[in-house]
Amino acid sequence: MLEMLSDPQVWILLLTLSTIEIVLGIDNLVFISIAVSRLPPERREFARKFGIAVACITRIALLLTLAWLAGLTTDLFVLLGQGISVRDLVLILGGVFLLVKGALEMREMIGGSHDDGSPAAKAAVSFGGVIAQIAVIDIVFSLDSVIAAVGMAGDYVPVMVTAILVAVSVMLLAARPLGQFIDANPTVKMLALAFILLIGAYLLLEGFDVHIPKGYIYGSMGFSVLVEVLNLWAKRNARRRGETF
């Protein structure tokens, strides 16, 4: 262990893996922020922290099953002439989950909520559902990053676990301000839901071995974010002038 700490390459590897985990964790943060927004305000902060802790556990659990992950690309069966592996199943099911979740959230934002039942009962059910959703979606989001980390780090399991813990710490710091910002700006939430639909479609296609360059996905998302930033900027300036935007 001491030899690893004295090796500069280990520190470079830790920095690289931590950066990858943080960057790829942004999608997960957006989903967590949207998921916990369904809860009463007083329960959101606890749900964020608990959900991120659960996400950390699921990600480390994935990492510690390296032998199993190494065989994920082996086809289990053939569907419509396409070989389907465990990895493909995770991507397909995760993509469908995101598409359904995003569509339902968009429908509720457009049409309003029509839930029945006592507030306490809804909160209890929603809390468990939110945590389950966060755990499931983290497995989907982290699968490729864990596989990439295994390919980069090889037998340096402690380094990979440390990188995940660093990324989770950053997520804990960023989750609350990001969630508050999304709650305060409904158009940003709609944009985030659109991103969830886009990511869901991407995962679904990847599961069926239809590869789309990630640069296209990130490019379109980046352009959309730029447009939304300009809209928010224009709205802020209009409010300062007392105008209606």
Image (cartoon, rainbow, N blue to C red):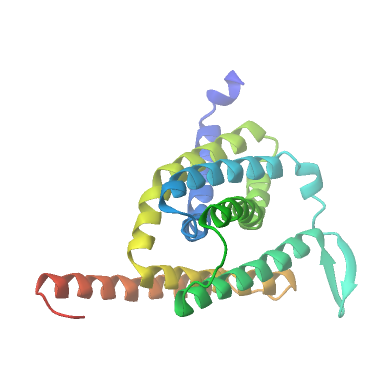
Between 123 and 95, the one nearer to me in the picture:
123
Q: Quadrant where the C terminus lies?
A: bottom left
Residue farthest toward the right in the current orientation of the protein? 77
Q: In this rendering, would 27 be left or right of 242?
A: right
How many numbered discs? 0
Q: In this rendering, would 73 be left or right of 236?
A: right
Can residue 15 be seen in the rendering of this structure? no
Can residue 69 be seen in the rendering of this structure? yes
Between 210 and 186, the one nearer to me in the picture:
186
The residue sitting at 68% across, 74% down in the picture is 205
Residue farthest toward the front in the current orientation of the protein? 118
- Give coordinates of residue 123: x percent, y percent: 54, 53
**Please, is residue 149 above or below residue 215 in the view?**
above
Residue farthest toward the left in the current orientation of the protein? 241
The residue sitting at 77% across, 64% down in the picture is 89
- Give coordinates of residue 190: x percent, y percent: 43, 73
Between 165 and 47, the one nearer to me in the picture:
47
Which image quadrant is residue 206 in?
bottom right
Q: Quadrant where the N terminus lies?
A: top right
Q: In this rendering, would 10 be left or right of 87?
A: left
**Please, is residue 21 above or below residue 182 in the view?**
above
- Give coordinates of residue 79: x percent, y percent: 87, 75
The residue sitting at 68% across, 45% down in the picture is 150
- Give coordinates of residue 216: x percent, y percent: 52, 75
